[in-house]
Amino acid sequence: MSELLSSFFSAYSLGLLAALLLLGAAVGFAAGLLGIGGGMLLVPFLTYLFSHRAFPSEHVVHMAIATSLSTILFTSLSSVWAHHQRGAVLWPVVRMLAPGIVLGSLLGAQIAGYMSTTVLALFFAIFVTFSATQMLLDKKPKPSRELPRAWGMLGAGAGIGTLSSLVGAGGGFISVPFMTWCNVTIHRAVATSAALGFPIALAGALGYVVAGWSLPAMPAGTLGYINLPALFCIVSTSILFAPLGARTAHAMPVKKLKRVFALLLYVLAAYMLYKGLRS
């Protein structure tokens, strides 16, 4: 631990530490507000910061995604508790989706290990743009539509877990539209998505540790693809701001919450598209 802290303070400037702490606060607030685990916000910013630290360019996006998933382990617990206190989390839905999510998250991390930085960044941008468009269009689901049965939920969970692991997010960008499409209210969908963030993050982070375990020339303080100094900085402030985001979410009207969600995703998708095309 002492060697890790030594490498941490020698390799990271005060400016970078401050940026990571502020990023953690924003991520925590987004996790509570939007139920997205903060990953959709975190990956582009970490990609930018890691790119300017002379980290191996072929691993920058992988490191950003892996570190993002690791932070969700902490932010999801903080935000889901705030939502649970309001009785908004649909725990039966969490139990039905969780097994598929764990399997999909483990698979997604292994797939990402075989993808180049360019392909991974472009995949992130395209899929997030699609998710944002679906949310912004705000198409009304058929009144008779409901969540699927057990096997359907297992399949949906596997899809959510795989895609979330590939882009380093808590799954809210898929699970929130999926649940609202099945006539779950936006506030309950956001709260339930926050609870799903933990199994996604746990399985995905373990997968990225395995996928990046034996890579040469990785920066000091990394565990597989996970950058531990960045993880510690971000988590230290994100867990404080997640409950504030959750309280704000319950105070906002549904349409405004959906619009904020969609516009945020568009901005982040644009940056990752730029990053992928320049790699």
Image (cartoon, rainbow, N blue to C red):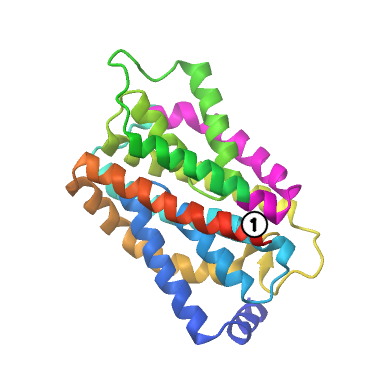
> Residue 35's x, y, as percent?
37, 46
Q: Which residue lies at the image location 31% right of the left edge and 51% below the top edge?
A: 33
Q: Secondary structure at mark 1?
A: helix
Magenta highlight on residue 85? no
Q: Quadrant of residue 192?
A: top left
Q: Which residues are magenta?
A: 93-121
- Measuring 39% from the left and 68% from the top, which residue is drawn there? 237
Q: Is residue 148 left or right of residue 260?
A: right
In the image shown, does 170 or 43 lie closer to the viewer?
43
At 61% from the left and 45% from the top, the residue drawn is 123
Q: Is residue 104 above or below residue 273?
A: above
Residue 86 seen in this snapshot: no
- Horizontal and vertical percent for residue 252? 19, 47
Q: Quadrant of the C terminus?
A: bottom right
Q: Amino acid at mark 1?
A: Leu
Q: Quadrant of the N terminus?
A: bottom right
Q: Position of residue 57 (x, y in %)?
A: 71, 66
Residue 106 visible in the displayed image:
yes
Q: Is residue 231 above or below residue 128?
A: below
**Residue 101's spot in the image, x, y percent?**
55, 34
Residue farthest toward the top in the current orientation of the protein: 144
Q: Quadrant of residue 239?
A: bottom left
**Magenta segment includes 110:** yes
* Residue hosting label 1: 277
Q: Is residue 110 left or right of residue 266?
A: right
Predominant secondary structure, magenta span:
helix
149 displayed left or right of 11: left
